[in-house]
Amino acid sequence: PRTIVSGVKPTGSLTLGNYLGALRRFVDLQHDARCVFPVVDLHGLTVPHDPERLRRLTVETATLYLAAGLDAASCVIFRQSDLSLHTELAYLLECTAYVGELDRMIQFKEKGRGRPKTRVSLYTYPVLMAADILAYRATHVPVGDDQRQHLELTRDLALRFNRAYGEVFVVPEMIPAVIGARIKDLRNPLAKMSKDAPDDAAGCVRLLDSPDVIRHKVMRAVTDSRHEVRYDPENQPGVANLLDILAACVGESDPAALATRYSSYGALKRDVADAVISLLAPLRARYADLAAAPEYVDAVLRDGAERARALAEPTVAAAKRAIGL
Ligand code: TYM
């Protein structure tokens, strides 16, 4: 049977990129497979953090899972830190991973290498991510493009462990997003839109932004001085990003085809703003209802943790036995 695992790190309020690259696809996949969707709060400890904010964002992220349309009865939604199995397995995988392969991780090179206050956990983070996935014998992992290398590592670790100690893990496949795999920052279309941007970052559309704020951010998106709407990510990254967003919102697979409908950046931006606002409207409404019922979200997380434990325990036990413990 297919098992899908994917997590979101609660280090900031979720963005349109998280929705298009991940969350929306979780919703589409949830009835085709067993689905396990942790809020991976332990990963939020890899960078300077504020304990209260992390706790708040963990609940906000879980609430957004539900607001986006995940069904708590069919999906296993839980807080990663409610289980010690992830960190337990991560250690066994650290004993499988090589320093050389972690040294090659692009995210670490960009965010931490060579800086005096980089936490050790940022370096080992991809191994914990591998544990998140392998503990559930995931067959498929829907993630945005920025996680591709981490998923490759996960596959390598599973294969290596299995070869050395016996077939314990399933080797998972990435499910890449067809469109919306890498949404860029509206103010800097060379960088990905990241929830870790400052809370008030103008280039970052948050799922909980009001329609006015979304419109304002989209209308101020950086374009270029060519005054020509063409889908050319290389030379017109800002315009291409707007077309990608529009395509992803309206379910069009070819952003270049959309480009032909526009002769001005203003008209394109207006349609992007409208499309994003209407895409997110139902989510916003459901979020407001759920936020008024925190005890419900709490119950979902508690129940999810029990179900997650039942799924992960046999795998972690098998891994311990196989490795000689
Ligand atoms: P995170 O929390 O940074 O992002 C959550 C998901 O959103 C996707 N994403 C994007 N997709 C398109 N455009 C963007 N601009 C964009 N920004 C983020 C990410 O690819 C991801 O799918 N290491 C992971 C969390 C993780 C995980 C896991 C994922 C931990 N354990 C196990 C899958 C399975 C991360 O930092 O994602």
Image: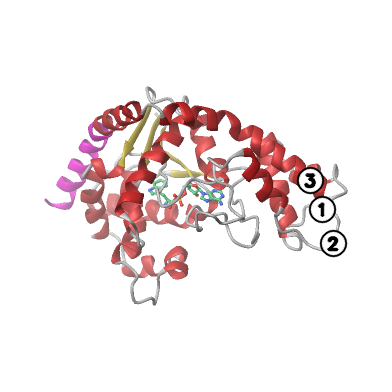
Q: To which residue does mark 2 refer?
A: 226
Tell whether position 52 is magenta: no
Q: Secondary structure at mark 3?
A: helix
Q: Quadrant of residue 253?
A: top right
**Residue 230 tag number:** 1
Q: Earlier in the sequence, mark 3 or mark 1?
A: 1
Q: Amino acid at mark 3?
A: Leu
Residue 174 in the image, given as x and y percentages of width and height:
48, 45
Is the image coloured rainbow, by chain, by secondary structure, or in one colour?
secondary structure
Q: To which residue does mark 3 refer?
A: 268
Q: Amino acid at mark 1?
A: Arg
Considering depth in this image, is 308 or 269 the residue closer to the camera?
A: 269
Q: Quadrant of residue 137?
A: top left
Identity of the residue drawn at 32% across and 56% down: 45
> Closer to the observer: label 3 or label 1?
3
Q: Secondary structure at mark 1?
A: loop
Residue 271 in the image, given as x and y percentages of width and height:
76, 40
Residue 173 in the image, given as x and y percentages of width and height:
46, 44
Considering depth in this image, is 210 or 147 the residue closer to the camera?
A: 210
Q: Report how far apart the C-alphas of labels 3 and 2 lie in the structure.
A: 14 Å
Identity of the residue drawn at 32% across and 46% down: 55
Mark 3: few/some/many CA within 10 Å (<14, 14-19, 20+): many
Mark 2: few/some/many CA within 10 Å (<14, 14-19, 20+): few
Pointers 3 and 2 in contact (CB under 8 A)? no
Asked whether residue 179 is in view, the answer is no
Q: What segment is highlighted magenta in the picture?
A: 308-325
